[in-house]
Image (cartoon, grey):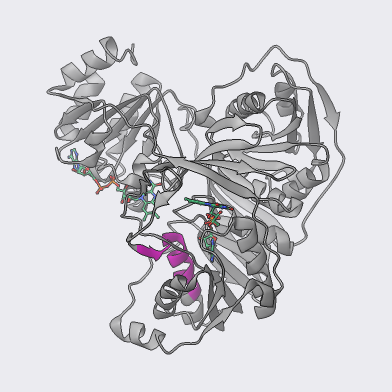
Amino acid sequence: MSILIIAEHDNQSLKPVTLNLVTAARQIGGDIDLLVAGENAQAAAETAGAIAGIRKVILADHAAYAHQLAENLGKLVVELADGYSHILAPGTTTGKNVAPRVAALLGVNQLSDIIAVEAADTFKRPIYAGNAIATVKSTDAVKVMTVRGTAFDAAEATGGSAAIEACGAVHQHADVRFVGEELAQSDRPELTAASVVVSGGRGMGNGDNFELLNKVADKLGAAVGASRAAVDAGFVPNDMQVGQTGKMVAPELYIAVGISGAIQHLAGMKDSKVIVAINKDEEAPIFQVADYSLVGDLFEAVPELESRL
Amino acid sequence: MKVLVAVKRVIDYNVKVRVKSDRSDVDLANVKMALNPFCEIAVEEAVRLKEAGTASEVVVVSIGSKACQEQLRTALALGADRAIQVEAADQLDSLSVARILQKVAEEESADLILLGKQAIDSDNNQTGQMLAALMDRPQATFASAVVVEGESLQVTREIDGGLQTLSLNLPAIVTTDLRLNEPRYASLPNIMKAKKKPLDVKTPDELGAQLAGSVELLGVEPPAERQAGIKVSSVEELVDKLRNEAKVIA
Ligand SMILES: Cc1cc2nc3c(=O)[nH]c(=O)nc-3n(C[C@H](O)[C@H](O)[C@H](O)COP(=O)(O)OP(=O)(O)OC[C@H]3O[C@@H](n4cnc5c(N)ncnc54)[C@H](O)[C@@H]3O)c2cc1C
Ligand SMILES: Cc1cc2nc3c(=O)[nH]c(=O)nc-3n(C[C@H](O)[C@H](O)[C@H](O)COP(=O)(O)OP(=O)(O)OC[C@H]3O[C@@H](n4cnc5c(N)ncnc54)[C@H](O)[C@@H]3O)c2cc1C
């Protein structure tokens, strides 16, 4: 068996989720190759080559891949697919955008967001907002799947010295063009990779009040997240949404502040190791999943929490 | 511009699903069903394009057993002009759904095809991308803003790092995210009117679509239950527990 992993990167550096995919690939078993498709992505490819246990890194370096457009990247992966038994992409917005295109072009179904490897053809994946875990078996010749990074430990980032093989194939779809992007700037750790996450909900009242959470986060080296209600209300940007339709997080510590605990929110955080909930309503469903429940006004509790850290 | 919207019948988002005692599947008997929330957003977007004079016709399609006609009627009540049910098993695999949608899109010569970004039952988030690949057309997934500019679209997408904007030439596929719009409620007169709007029934065979189907469901289990936690009476106690019991902070 041999496995191709579509690496997540920003041309300069690899995103940590790539390391979680390497672990998933090891559990499947077989040779592991990493595809780094980007523009001026030599640095990312070199980091990929340093991961222990990688057979080779394929570097496709061209303007067509600069923004990971699914139309171009999908065709590149399909061209490279020959001989691979598994193609893995991260369950990020980039991975989810491209992997189904690869699957469709190869004439196979995709397994979305797997959380466990049972056998080389059998996997577990959450359905219904995580209220059920399905075990699914694929009989397709090549298994195309997206992987939930938080469900697998990170592999060692160093110790390997895989060769980098250049791939000159260029696929450029004539009918799509990158116009621009607005990326959130933050010195805090990435939400899905952080070991502590502090999230705020509608109870925060407005965007300025998130400053209270930022201060706690700074003391804990935490990332800051939010519920959908907080994002919809315009308190914070969309990239902070945790939940069924936002980001899936599983940190060591998750602190939910002014969040009621709707199933869609729980879907994104209930695999956290320790959950703290701060809410003034003692009936709030969030308390049913919390390890430590504090009933009280967040505007008193959060500043006090910060001062005691 | 002709708009095709794919809609799916799913469990209502307020219902917490349970696993059957024999663990063969989830229990959907007597459970409230609804239009997938993301599909509702897709219908709303299409209807707004029609109201703005940009779209000439809005056609909705659903693939499944006769029961999904209920959701097609809902979409008609929200303002779609015409509906198509493609008779097939419920829970058809995504590639088969995408292949059927491709045939419908070709038959209808749709310029814009809108889908939800994910169905909240299987949470797959893949059908729109598969359809775009099969048609070799551009896609904009997780859309939070769609602007039509003649023969092209400017779409803002919600991505992990923030927002991305793409320009796509029609025909194109767009999948909706939560913040694209806030769907309206169907008014009673519109619900009545919807009953008289055309609803065609087709089969995958008639459309010439080949079904795939290679993912087998071996079983379903409930997620690991969390141990009931404790109530702390003060922030001081909370910090103490986190430090000395859970040992998750320094
Ligand atoms: C298709 C679909 C997808 C969805 N996806 C997601 C998703 O990915 N993520 C997500 O989060 N939601 C999602 N939702 C929305 C979800 O159903 C809830 O509406 C949302 O999570 C509620 O957010 P909230 O808990 O912040 O707000 P609310 O439910 O309004 O809760 C606010 C809480 O704050 C508390 N509070 C208020 N003031 C204070 C105070 N001063 N001190 C302490 N506590 C206070 C209140 O007691 C209350 O419990 C989705 C919904 C749908 C239909
Ligand atoms: C409990 C359970 C059991 C399952 N068992 C099997 C099984 O035995 N075999 C198997 O192959 N698969 C099985 N599946 C997988 C699942 O049924 C299909 O993969 C899925 O229904 C296909 O689309 P999706 O909902 O994943 O699409 P998504 O990609 O999540 O949906 C995105 C969008 O696609 C459109 N769309 C999706 N489906 C339709 C539709 N039917 N009609 C119109 N538009 C649609 C909608 O616009 C929707 O918003 C099972 C899933 C579950 C939850």
Boundaries of the magenta span: B33-46
Residue A277 forms part of the magenta stretch: no
Q: Quadrant of the C terminus of chain B?
A: top left
Q: In the displayed structure, would residue B199 be above or below residue A62?
A: below
Q: Position of residue B235 (x, y in %)?
A: 17, 22
Q: How many marks?
A: 0
Tell me which residue sits at (69%, 25%) in the image: A29
Tell me which residue sits at (26%, 30%) in the image: A290
Tell me which residue sits at (52%, 68%) in the image: B64
Q: Position of residue B223 (x, y in %)?
A: 39, 36
**Looking at the rendering, which quadrant does residue B93 occupy?**
bottom right
Image-based side of B82 in relation to B36, left or right? right
Image-based side of B66 in relation to B211, left or right? left
Q: Position of residue A186 (x, y in %)?
A: 47, 32
Q: In the displayed structure, would residue B241 be above or below residue A257?
A: above
**Looking at the rendering, which quadrant does residue A123 occupy?**
top right
Compare residues B222 and A147 and report the one nearer the observer.
B222
Image-based side of B185 in relation to A61, left or right? left
